[in-house]
Image: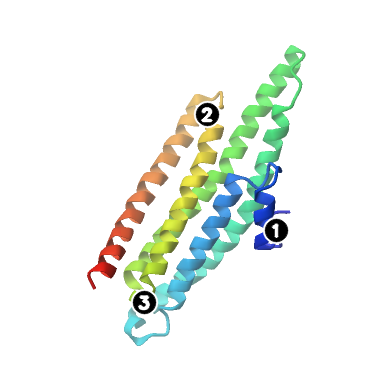
Amino acid sequence: MLDGNLTINEFIEKLGSKDAVPGGGGAAALTASLGISLCKMAANLTVGKKKFADVEAEMYDIIAECDKLSAEFVGLIQKDADGFLPLSKAYGLPTETEEQKKFKEETLERELVHAAAVPFEIMEKCARAIELSAIVAEKGSKLVVSDAACAINTCMSALKCASLNVYINTKYMKDKEKALELNQRADKLISDSSEVADKVFLNVINSMKNS
């Protein structure tokens, strides 16, 4: 199992082995869990201070959502592996007869869609994590603004990593309309999240250099 029961060292060892899973999708989910934890930390270090009393309720809401996203990212590590293994088996199906060829083609198409679904879900959750981190960077304690910016960039890296696992599956889909739809949705997530991430990064850098 690739859930939260593995130690960090065990996960890293397994990631670097010859095993097909965990792979890029699992690494993206784990990376995103680190990013959302940084967001939670920055929010936690904002609450309880008189100076930020007006945003305290919002920070507590963000903390609660961070907890939810963190658990979901950890679950997506195993979910990504579960989505890849049937696809891996489908590539090994026999093609000696026309019936076998047809069965393999239909199975591959179905499993390609399934395999793309999980990294796309990771992308969507990363986008939300970036939105939350941007709020903390803007409204939270300035003492942890760098951590909030780190959270954004960590989740942005995870989002891009996950996107590659979407595109590699859509590339081989026979249903080109479905592939195009998924690609366009992934493109938009990258574009919208990059805009937020780049803006916060430049603002934080400028605030630290010019303070």
Q: Residue at x 73, y 33 (%)?
A: 89
- Color encoding of the figure: rainbow
55 lies above or below 182: below
Q: Are marks 2 and 1 in contact (CB under 8 Å)?
A: no
For residue 54, side relative to residue 59 (left or right): left
Q: Earlier in the sequence, mark 3 or mark 1?
A: 1
The residue beneath circle 1 is 10
Q: x and y percent of residue 211 in the render?
A: 24, 73
The residue beneath circle 2 is 171
Q: Secondary structure at mark 3?
A: helix
The dot on residue 143 is 3
Residue 174 shows in the view = yes
For residue 93, side relative to residue 206 (left or right): right
Q: Nearer the viewer, mark 3 or mark 1?
A: 1
The span from disc 3 to disc 2 (Cα, nearest Å) is 44 Å
Q: How dense is the environment of label 3, judged by Cα within 10 Å: few (below 14), some, or many (20 and up)? A: few
* Residue type indicated by callout 1: Glu
Q: How dense is the environment of label 1, judged by Cα within 10 Å: few (below 14), some, or many (20 and up)? A: few
Q: Residue at x 53, y 48 (%)?
A: 121
Q: Secondary structure at mark 1?
A: helix
Q: Earlier in the sequence, mark 3 or mark 2?
A: 3
* Residue type indicated by callout 2: Lys
The span from disc 3 to disc 1 (Cα, nearest Å) is 34 Å
Q: Earlier in the sequence, mark 2 or mark 1?
A: 1
Q: How dense is the environment of label 2, judged by Cα within 10 Å: few (below 14), some, or many (20 and up)? A: some
